[in-house]
Image (cartoon, helix red, strand yellow):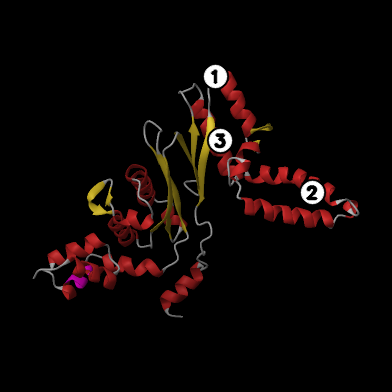
Amino acid sequence: MAFTAQDVAKLREITGAGMMECKKALIATDGNMEKAGEYLREQGVVTAAKKQSRIASEGAVGAFVCACGCYGALVEVNCESDFVAKGEQFQNLVTGLARHVAEIDPKNVEECLTQPYVLDKSVTVGDVINAATAKIGEKISLRRFARQDNGLQESYLHMGGKIGVLLEVGTDAASEGVSALCHDITLHIAAFGPSYVYNQEVPAAEVEHEKGILKIQIQNDPKAAGKPAMVIEKMIEGKLGKFYKDVCLIDQDFAKDSTKTVRAVVAEFNKQYGANIKINRFVRFVTGEGLEKKNENLADEVAKLSGK
């Protein structure tokens, strides 16, 4: 019995399995939709699809930087438990997905899931994730990724991927010690969590919101009572410096030497080595950031299993 692309799409909608798995099932069952569904169940694929309703807020951030350091990627892959997140099979999957994003450059997660997997082009990324879900027994999902390719890339993973950083610097030549410098900056970003590199990158709306808060703070300060509006505006501008230092990397006190700012450390490096290093951008992912957390304990799980 022949089947069409629409049949594959319909089977995928019914079962939640990947496109490639659905196509294989229809081939194996000569296009019989009902038997194809049974085939997927026998292969454990539908079981994997049913796990998609679970909460997956654990997981890991993975990174991949090419050998020349000119492009790299950061990904977050989620699962249900910290135990699985630390496992070798899950960690290998995360690394593989980071490599896929770095080398294939998908536009978004949806496109990524339909692409032939970089390590095995006979299956899609979605198929690989579904297979891992079925084998490991937990919902696994690719949540987000970022790719950079306009400078020298350096990555850092903290605590097995609980936090991940991908830093990009511009440089006109390979300089002695540049890798160590970039590594130290990624450590700083992981620890201090800046949102931007430079002050001018902060959106105007965010700056105005901060100014509004500072204005109220000053107005509530008895010491500022009766001061002219012009003086208050100058006080606000002065206090904005601390705000920028909190959110912008370049003017933060350097993690490895708090007597210097990141800006000063980069400037000293450039002077010492005759280099022209400039921080272009960075990405920082925290695993599970903003996701609903699973809130169940072992006693609850046992009670559910026993029907109590």
Secondary structure of the residue carrying tag 1 is: helix
Question: Main SS type for the magenta part?
Answer: helix
Secondary structure of the residue carrying tag 3 is: helix
Judging by the rendered image, the residue that carries numbered circle 3 is: 185
Identified at 36% across, 67% down, the residue is: 51
Q: Amino acid at mark 2?
A: Glu
Identified at 14% across, 73% down, the residue is: 32
Q: Which residues are magenta?
A: 36-41
Q: Residues within 10 Å of mark 3 (few under 14, many from 20)?
A: many
Judging by the rendered image, the residue that carries numbered circle 2 is: 233
Of 113 and 235, the residue lying toward us = 235
Residue 129: percent from the left, percent from the top?
32, 57
Identified at 84% across, 47% down, the residue is: 231
Q: Residue 275, relative to residue 69: is it above or below?
A: above
Secondary structure of the residue carrying tag 2 is: helix
Q: Residue 265, relative to residue 304: is it above or below?
A: above
Judging by the rendered image, the residue that carries numbered circle 1 is: 273
Q: Residues within 10 Å of mark 2 (few under 14, many from 20)?
A: some
Q: Residue 62, relative to residue 257: is it above or below?
A: below
Closer to the eye: label 1 or 3: 1
Q: Amino acid at mark 1?
A: Tyr
Give the position of the N terminus as an image quadrant.
Answer: bottom left
